[in-house]
Amino acid sequence: MGQVDATVAVSRPTNIDELDRVLGGGLVPGAVVLLAGEPGVGKSTLLLDVAAKAAGPEQRTLYITGEESASQVRLRADRIDALSPHLYLAAETDLAAVLGHIQQVQPALLILDSVQTVASAELDGAPGGPAQIREVANALIRESKTRAMSTLLVGHVTKEGAIAGPRLLEHLVDVVLSFEGDRHARLRLIRGVKNRYGATDEVGCFELHDSGIVGLPDPSGLFLTKRAEPVPGTCLTVTLEGRRPLVAEVQALLVDSVIPSPRRATSGLDSPRIAMILAMLERHGGVRLGKMDIYAATVGGVKLSEPSADLAIALALASSAADTPLPQGMVAIGEVGLAGEVRRVTGVERRLAEAARLGFTHALVPPEPGKVPKGMRVVEVATIGDALAAIPGRPGRGSRRTPRQGRDTDGAENRRGRVDLTDERQRAVPNYLDIPDSADELMAGWEEIEPE
């Protein structure tokens, strides 16, 4: 036994920064990477771009396609400008022929599109079967480890979104990446599911163009709507995709229902969680929503599944119900419980730093948010009632006073919208709270956390 030379396994950049971020710096010689995604998401386009940019005089790249002809791949390469004299292309579906091309070209990087289309003549069964996938994967892994050749395998997914083929395939490879995106949106995400050479909590962001796929080092702009004045039913939040904070916009639209069973439609949001937030708003926020059609969505095709978006969703719904916009330049971060409490979430400091970098000046956060960016006014909210005070004209904490004009206790409609203040709980409270309409006045009256 001798010493192991660790320098042989130093990663080589692919020259695509967003992919290198997920891989942990680049491709390690001898590593086998499985990239899986739905049809049409852009796997082949991305890997063809990787093949061209990684190719060089000392690092040949071999791109083998089993789904298209060589001429079809060449046409796509012309369209996305992915051409290189050190990039070799072959169309093969036989494992022996693939190994022959590897022997002849001696590549530093092999790309196989896809592993389900290649079969070995020594085994029975159609390409894509469990036995064939195991044989092809094992043969390519042996070649990769022996030659210190990086290998990128394209994998199919089932209709449920799982990687097709035996689960053993995911155990055999070194890295598993998931390529996600709505075909009707421009955003594409690469997530690390497994990585023997780096972290699995990184996410790469890409934007789909006619000329190919381009990395997005600062993708928050895709998820925001630029407008001169705030509008009712919108609220901004900061979500974490892996370790990357992204500012996203939640929109809600509430209208009187004309059918016995009101509609509930969502896009980019989790429907069961929306239902729980609606119930919480009715019970603890006094917002009557039972006879209204409710539509909730995100902007730019982003999907918000983590609980930190609860507070922004609740505020967007309440803002639409009151037909009153939230203060401009404000973000809301926090998980909302069924008891109406606002709970802490992970990475609040990182989220606030991203919001401050993009110019946001106010934030509603759960108690004890940690370090606050300089120049940002951060307000702790312990309950949904505290958070609803951000809507001008809504009851909240502050100084008591007599009911203002248009907000009487005998059933009159709120002058700003359809917030019903006539239930027994609210009639039992004789006075309401004076909430200024100005965002500066609003925030000045609250307990603030001074920036460190």
Image (cartoon, rainbow, N blue to C red):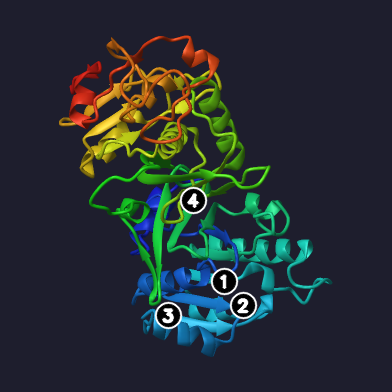
Residue positioned 77% across, 65% down in the render? 129
Chain-order first, disc 3 or disc 4: 3
Mark 3 vs mark 4: in front: 4
Mark 2 neighbour class, 10 Å CA radius: few under 14, some 14 to 19, many 20 or more: many
Residues at badges 1 and 2 in contact (C-beta under 8 Å)? yes
Cα distance between the residues tagged 2 and 3? 15 Å
9 above or below 233? below
Residue positioned 25% across, 40% down in the render? 328
- The residue labelled by disc 3 is 87
- The residue labelled by disc 1 is 112
Mark 1 vs mark 2: in front: 1
Q: In the drawing, does residue 203 fall left or right of residue 56?
A: right
Amino acid at the residue labelled 1: Leu
- The residue labelled by disc 2 is 98
Q: Nearer the viewer, residue 181 or 86?
A: 181
Q: Nearer the viewer, residue 307 or 452?
A: 307
Task: Return the x and y of residue 128 as percentages of the image width and height.
Answer: 73, 68
